[in-house]
Amino acid sequence: QTRSAKSFALLVSANCHLRPTTDANQPTDHPNLLNRQSVAMTSIVVQHPNGSLRAIASNDDDVSVDSNFDPESPTIKDAGGATLESVKYDAATIRAEFKTYQSILPKPDELLQEQHSFQLLRSKINESNIALPRFLQYDFEGGIKPHYALCCLLLSEYEAKEREQTAQTLAQTWLIRIASLGCLYPQLNNPADFIRDQFNRVAHAVPTNVVKPHVLRKKIKNRGLPVPNYFLDPEDHKQFPPHIALLVILQDGKKESRKLDNFLYRAAFSLFAFVALLLRIVLEVIGGAGAIWGGAEVFTLRNADNAELWRWLSVFVGILCLLRFVTLNAPQKEDEGDILGPAGPWSLRLPVRLRAVCDHPFHYFVRALPPFSPGKKND
C-alpha cells in the first residue's frame, strides 16, 4: 500500500507540472492551438523495474540543462547584417508595410499613453480592410513576434548609423556640462530618441537570430547592461509593449509626430518646468531659512542683541535645505524610465506629465546617464 501511494503521488506530481504552452499572440479558440494543448497535456509514463512510476519529461524540457548556460548567438558585430534571415524579414519590409496602415494609427503620444493592445490594433487595421503587418499576425498566419521586428528595425539603424544626436546643440550640451561640473547631460524629450538610446546601449549584445524574449533579456543582463523597458517582462510595471515602441519608431519624423518637436509646444513645457524649479527652490530652500528667521521673531527669541546670531543660523539652515533639495531632486542613473515614464516625459498622460515635471523639474532638462557613444560600449 505504501508503494502504491508513492507511485500515485509521483504520477499526480508529473501531470501537475505539465502545462499547456500557449503563444501570447495566439487566439485561444484556434483548432491548431487546441490540438497542441492536448498533446502538451499528455504525459509519458513508464513502469520502473522496482514497480514505481516515473514521469519522463518531453524532449524540449530544459530542466536537464544548466539554467546558467548561455549559448553563443550571432550579434551585429559578428553577423554583419540586421536581417532576420530565418523568417525572411528586414527593415525595408517593415517600413513598406507601415505605409499601408500609417494613416489609421493614433499619434505617437497617444500610443504611448494608452498603450493599445495587440488585439485592438489588429481589429483597427482589419476594419479598414488593410493587410496586417507580420508583427501583428499570429504564428499560424505566418507572423513574427513584435520584439523580433523591433530588433530588426533598430539594428538596421544602428548598423547604418542613420541616427545622430541632432536634437541637442553642442552649445547646450557644454552649457549643461559646465553648470553641473560634468555630472549631468541634456535630457531626451522625444520618445523615439529615448527608445533608440536605450537600444543603442545594448545593440552589440542583441542576437541577430530569432530568440525568445526571456533569452534576449538574459543575454543583455549577462553583459551587465540595463534591459530596455520594451524588452522587460510584461509583469514588470516599467514595461511597455514592444509593438508600441516599434510603431513610435516608424512614426518618428512623419507628420503625426511633428507635434513632439514643435518649438512652441516644447517651449511651453520648458517654461513650465523652469517655473516649477524656481518655486521648489523658493519653498524648500529660501522657505526653510525664512522659517528660522520668522519663527524666532514670533516666539520672541530674536531681539536687537542677538539678531546677527539668528541671521547666521538662518543661513546655515538654508544651506542644509539646499543640500537636501539637491539630494532629493538631482537626477540619478536609476531614474531612467521610471520617474518620467518608460519613454521619457512624453510617454505620460498630460496630467501625469505635468505632475512628474512639478515633482522632478530637474529631470525635464537634464539626465545623469551619459549619451550613447558608438566607440564606448559597456561590455
Image (cartoon, rainbow, N blue to C red):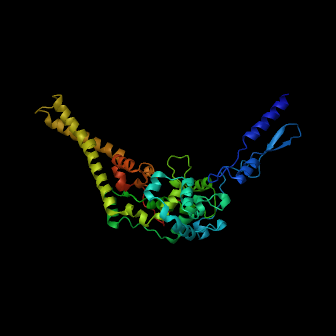
Where, by quadrant of the figure, is residue 215 drawn?
bottom right
Q: Nearer the viewer, residue 123 or 293?
A: 123
Residue 353 as seen in the image, left or right of residue 79: left
Q: Is residue 364 visible?
A: yes
Residue 363 screen position, x and y as percent: 37, 52
Residue at the farthest right position: 49
x, y percent for residue 111 = 47, 56
Residue pictured at 56% horizontal, 54% vertical: 118
Judge left or right: residue 175 versus residue 296: right
Please provide percent x and percent y for residue 256: 43, 63
Residue 212 at x, y percent in the picture: 63, 56
Q: Quadrant of the N terminus?
A: top right
> Which residue is depicted at the point 60% across and 56% down?
216
Tell whether 221 sits left or right of 305.
right
Quarter of the image for residue 148 reads: bottom right
Q: Is 135 located above or below residue 314 in the figure?
A: below
In which quadrant is the C terminus drawn?
Answer: bottom right
What residue is drawn where x is 57% and y is 60%? 126
235 vs 321, nearest the viewer: 235
Can residue 316 be seen in the rendering of this structure? no
Viewer-side residue, 147 vs 61: 147
- In the picture, residue 191 is in which quadrant? bottom left
Vertical position of residue 298 compared to residue 111: above or below: above
Count of numbered labels shown in the rendering: 0
Residue, far left: 304
